């Protein structure tokens, strides 16, 4: 998504500059009065902003409604967590919304690949 925005421009009629970055991951540093799901220090991931309407996640800090945030899976480093949300949302939509996948059904995915040992990349925590 970020490549498309850089190539074609933002999706909304707002003045530039715009902070890009749809997917994000980080640590909660502050919560508002209405936020009850997360605590300061929680590792989270999210897909929000970066299309020209809201500030994107290339910013050092972002403010986001807690409806669009989830706790990051424990084994994920920040780089993995920040790379996954839009990809997973797209896969979910393809399988369940468009494909009609139901509980108990099985899916065979041809040409799928995964890295079994992420530690060899020496990514920071």
Image (cartoon, rainbow, N blue to C red):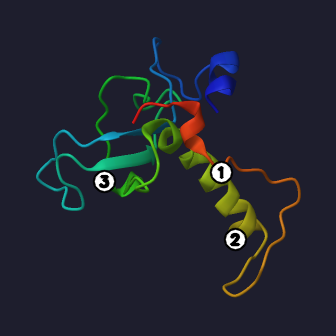
Query: Which residue occupies the extreme top position in the image?
Result: 17
- Tag 2 secondary structure: helix
Where residue 70 appears, x then y in whole percent? 38, 56
Name the N-terminal-most of marks 2 and 1: 2
* Label 2 CA crowd tier, 10 Å (few <14, some 14–19, many 20+): few
**Real-space Cα distance between discs 2 and 1?**
26 Å
Instruction: Tell me if 52 is positioned left or right of 61 in this view.
Output: right
Q: Which residue is mark 3?
A: 66
* Label 3 CA crowd tier, 10 Å (few <14, some 14–19, many 20+): some
The residue sitting at 74% across, 61% down in the picture is: 94
Instruction: Tell me if 59 is positioned left or right of 92 in this view.
Output: left
**Real-space Cα distance between discs 3 and 2?**
24 Å
Name the N-terminal-most of marks 3 and 2: 3
Mark 3 touches mark 2? (CB < 8 Å): no
- Tag 3 secondary structure: helix
Classify the position of the C terminus by image quarter: top left
Q: Which residue is mark 2?
A: 96
Classify the position of the N terminus by image quarter: top right
The residue sitting at 20% across, 46% down in the picture is: 41
**Real-space Cα distance between discs 1 and 3?**
31 Å
> Which numbered marker is on residue 5?
none
* Label 1 CA crowd tier, 10 Å (few <14, some 14–19, many 20+): few
Instruction: Tell me if 125 is positioned left or right of 39 in this view.
Output: right
Q: Which residue is mark 1?
A: 116
Identify which residue, 120 or 86, lies in the foreground: 120
- Tag 1 secondary structure: loop
């Amino acid at each position: 998504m970020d490549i498309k925005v850089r190539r074609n421009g933002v999706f909304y009629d707002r003045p530039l500059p715009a902070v890009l970055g749809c997917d994000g991951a980080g640590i909660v540093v502050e919560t508002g009065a209405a936020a009850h799901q997360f605590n300061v220090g929680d590792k989270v991931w999210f897909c929000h902003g970066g299309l020209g309407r809201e500030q994107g996640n290339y910013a050092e800090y972002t403010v986001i409604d807690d409806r669009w945030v989830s706790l990051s899976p424990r084994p994920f480093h920040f780089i993995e967590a920040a790379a996954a949300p839009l990809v997973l949302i797209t896969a979910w939509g393809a399988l369940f919304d468009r494909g009609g996948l139901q509980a108990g059904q099985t899916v065979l995915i041809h040409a799928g690949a995964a890295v079994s040992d992420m530690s060899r990349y020496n990514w920071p925590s």
